[in-house]
């Protein structure tokens, strides 16, 4: 994976290590009080990272569609 200073990506990498050296981790987080959604992803290599981001974006869109928000082309990552 290319270096990424994002705390959310570091959290994903920590989970990958703690859950048995996983190749990819994708997290979808919902805050129902604020009606927001956040996605973070991690891949062990550059190719796995790009794939995890693609899968994470698809999962993000699926959650948005299920909540009636429609498809969002790229998630906002505060």
Image (tube, rainbow, N blue to C red):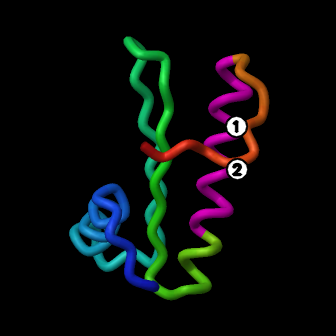
**Disc 1 on helix, strand or loop?**
helix
Residue at position x 59%, y 54% in the image: 56
Percent across and percent down for residue 6 are 34, 62
Quadrant where the C terminus sits is top left
**Disc 2 on helix, strand or loop?**
helix
Percent across and percent down for residue 74 are 68, 48
Q: Which residue is mark 1?
A: 62
Q: Residue furthest top?
A: 33
Give the side of residue 76 with respect to residue 67, left or right: left
Q: Relative to residue 41, is residue 33 depicted above or below?
A: above
Residue at position x 48%, y 25% in the image: 36
The CA distance from mark 1 to mark 2 is: 6 Å
Magenta stretch, overall SS = helix
Q: Which residues are magenta?
A: 52-67
Foreground residue among 17 and 75:
75
Give the side of residue 18 with respect to residue 1, left or right: left
Label disc, if present, on residue 58 of the rendered structure: 2
Label disc, if present, on residue 74 of the rendered structure: none
In magenta stretch: residue 31 = no
Residue at position x 26%, y 74% in the image: 17
């Amino acid at each position: 994976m290319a270096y990424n200073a994002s705390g959310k990506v570091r959290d994903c990498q920590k989970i990958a290590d703690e859950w048995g050296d996983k190749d990819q981790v994708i997290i979808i987080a919902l805050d129902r009080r604020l009606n927001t959604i956040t996605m973070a992803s991690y891949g062990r290599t550059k190719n796995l990272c790009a794939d995890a981001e693609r899968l994470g974006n698809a999962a993000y869109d699926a959650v948005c569609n299920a909540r009636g928000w429609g498809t969002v082309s790229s998630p906002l990552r505060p």
